[in-house]
Image (tube, grey):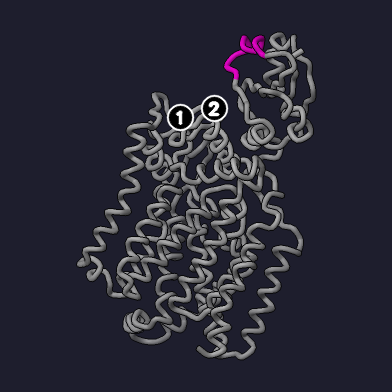
């Protein structure tokens, strides 16, 4: 082993502290996000309280909307038990998954390319929001864990397909099965692109002739079968579902898959397909680097189609290990990008599983230019430094969420009266539920929140205990609160104490 090979391999160990630092730095400092992150935390607290590890609950009742398997909620519940009820604990699993994503991506790349290529690809992703951003690596959601399992399965599958590691196909099935337990059918987002790669490599029929392929498929199918059986035996069956599906398994396919991607009216909003979704999302989550990616794509198109025998050239690439990674990456981001651009309900984080392959494609372009212009590596380093500066030290970007500014998603009442909430044996909540992030803050201060169904139950509250409700509910039921004193209030919420 020469000195260059030794230095190359050490890049992997250099990447680890870099990724760990950016994955965990100020992890608990950002406010809880209103929708999915807050709901995940509430699901986890309710799971701890009621001991039901199968059915997700929200505000003390079976969750009638969320349909994902509970794997990530188990993680968050474990975090809360080990590290306390706070924003850092809410996001630990995502940070750990982010570290795994980068290390797995590195290992996938070095199957075909150099350690330097892998290191550079990972560095371009760190200052973007595609992985270390909202709803993926920096929040308490499902997507970072999903991507980690997808890449773990892909690494093992590629080792089986291209490097003859026969047992790796079973590990691929196992990790993709865990991806199903993480986010249901989203387990399959990489499969169309991977299928194209298998065909281009001429491995489709050889795979069909292998007994191990069918055993691995059987192993993978055990996960949805096990989940279906569990829900059939122990799942909550709803007589009056508010969305499609009477149980979590049905909702996972009918509501989370069919309705989400086909309905123009979804969750009370008018939704339309965005034909430019792929480009809009890259501009937001792969910012600055997306221009290099487009230039690399144009370069590749002119290089490939500017010459005759395109099919022969692609076939030749399929036989060269150094080009096989590009042959995998392009179908992955093209097919997922096309699907999301014709679906009616799409979010920026839906494209996250494809962005590592966008980064790989980008670096292929940089590598090609470096053979033509000797200053390319220096230009790359300057641009890399610019993107790090803009993300972490430059002007702070304002992230525009689809949250009206006059809504009730924010209140300082809970933080201002944290000691009062902690000292109260029980917090009573009545009327319409508070916003999800507000409810999670209540849970952080006191897990013993009891939900009252009617005003008659107010009289049973012991002296000195607190009630948290909305101003509108208090105004419309003032007589029922004549034995309470107002502790504090803001535009939307009020805290009362039993006299």
User: Does the rendering let one see residue 407?
Assistant: yes
Left or right placement of residue 47 versus residue 170 in this view: right
Instruction: Identify the disc placed on residue 408.
Output: none
Sort mark 1 into few (<14), some (14-19) or many (20+) by Cα contacts within 10 Å: few
The quarter of the image holding the C terminus is top right
The residue under label 1 is 242
* Magenta-drawn stretch contains 458: yes
Q: Position of residue 178 (x, y in %)?
A: 41, 52
User: What is the tally of numbered marks visible in this picture?
Assistant: 2
The residue under label 2 is 60
The residue at 53%/85% (across/down) is 5
Q: Secondary structure at mark 1?
A: loop
User: Does the rendering let one see residue 287?
Assistant: no
Q: Position of residue 156 (x, y in %)?
A: 39, 66
* Magenta-drawn stretch contains 88: no
Q: Nearer the viewer, mark 1 or mark 2?
A: 2
Left or right placement of residue 488 versus residue 282 in this view: right
Q: Which residues are magenta?
A: 452-461
Q: Secondary structure at mark 2?
A: loop
Quadrant for residue 227, please give it: top left
The residue at 52%/57% (across/down) is 277
What predominant SS class does the magenta segment belong to?
helix
Q: Position of residue 426 (x, y in %)?
A: 66, 23
Sort mark 2 into few (<14), some (14-19) or many (20+) by Cα contacts within 10 Å: some
């Amino acid at each position: 082993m020469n000195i260059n090979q030794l230095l190359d391999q050490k890049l992997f160990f250099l990447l680890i502290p870099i990724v760990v630092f950016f994955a965990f730095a100020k992890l608990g400092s950002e406010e809880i996000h209103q929708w999915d992150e807050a709901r995940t935390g509430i699901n986890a607290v309710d799971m701890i309280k009621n001991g039901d590890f199968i059915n997700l609950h929200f505000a003390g009742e079976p969750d009638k909307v969320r349909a994902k398997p509970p794997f990530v909620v188990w993680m968050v519940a474990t975090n809360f038990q080990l590290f306390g009820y706070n924003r850092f604990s809410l996001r630990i699993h995502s940070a750990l998954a982010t570290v795994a994503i980068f290390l797995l991506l590195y290992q996938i790349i070095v199957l075909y390319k150099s350690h330097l290529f892998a290191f550079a690809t990972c560095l371009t992703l760190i200052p973007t929001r595609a992985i270390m951003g909202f709803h993926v690596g920096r929040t308490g959601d499902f997507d970072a864990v999903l991507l980690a399992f997808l890449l773990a399965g892909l690494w093992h599958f590629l080792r089986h397909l291209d490097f003859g590691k026969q047992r790796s196909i079973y590990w691929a099935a196992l990790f993709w099965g865990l991806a199903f337990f993480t986010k249901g059918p989203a387990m399959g987002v990489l499969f169309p692109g991977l299928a194209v790669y298998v065909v281009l490599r001429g491995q489709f029929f050889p795979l069909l002739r292998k007994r191990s392929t069918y055993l691995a498929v059987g192993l993978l199918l055990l996960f949805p079968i096990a989940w279906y059986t569990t829900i059939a035996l122990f799942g909550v069956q709803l007589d009056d579902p508010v969305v499609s599906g009477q149980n979590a398994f049905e909702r996972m396919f009918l509501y989370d898959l069919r309705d989400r991607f086909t309905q123009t009216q979804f969750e009370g909003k008018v939704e339309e397909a965005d034909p430019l979704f792929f480009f809009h999302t890259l501009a937001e989550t792969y910012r600055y680097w997306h221009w290099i990616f487009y230039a690399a794509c144009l370069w590749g198109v002119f290089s490939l189609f500017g010459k005759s025998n395109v099919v022969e050239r692609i076939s030749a690439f399929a036989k060269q290990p150094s080009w096989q990674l590009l042959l995998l990456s392009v179908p992955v981001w093209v097919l997922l990008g096309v699907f999301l651009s014709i679906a009616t309900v799409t979010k920026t984080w839906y494209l996250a599983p494809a962005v590592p392959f966008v980064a790989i494609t980008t670096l292929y372009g940089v590598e090609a230019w470096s053979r033509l212009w000797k200053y390319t590596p220096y230009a790359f380093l300057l641009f890399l430094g610019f993107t790090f500066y803009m993300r972490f030290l430059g002007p702070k970007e304002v992230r525009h969420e689809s949250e009206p500014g006059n809504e009730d998603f924010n209140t300082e009442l809970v933080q201002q009266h944290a000691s009062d909430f902690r000292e109260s044996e029980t917090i009573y909540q009545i009327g319409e539920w508070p916003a999800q992030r507000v409810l999670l803050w209540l849970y952080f201060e006191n897990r013993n929140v009891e939900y009252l169904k009617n005003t008659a139950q107010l009289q049973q509250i012991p002296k000195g205990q607190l009630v948290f409700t909305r101003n509108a509910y208090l105004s419309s039921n003032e007589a029922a609160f004549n034995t309470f004193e107002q502790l504090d209030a803001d535009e939307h919420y009020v805290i009362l104490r039993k006299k």
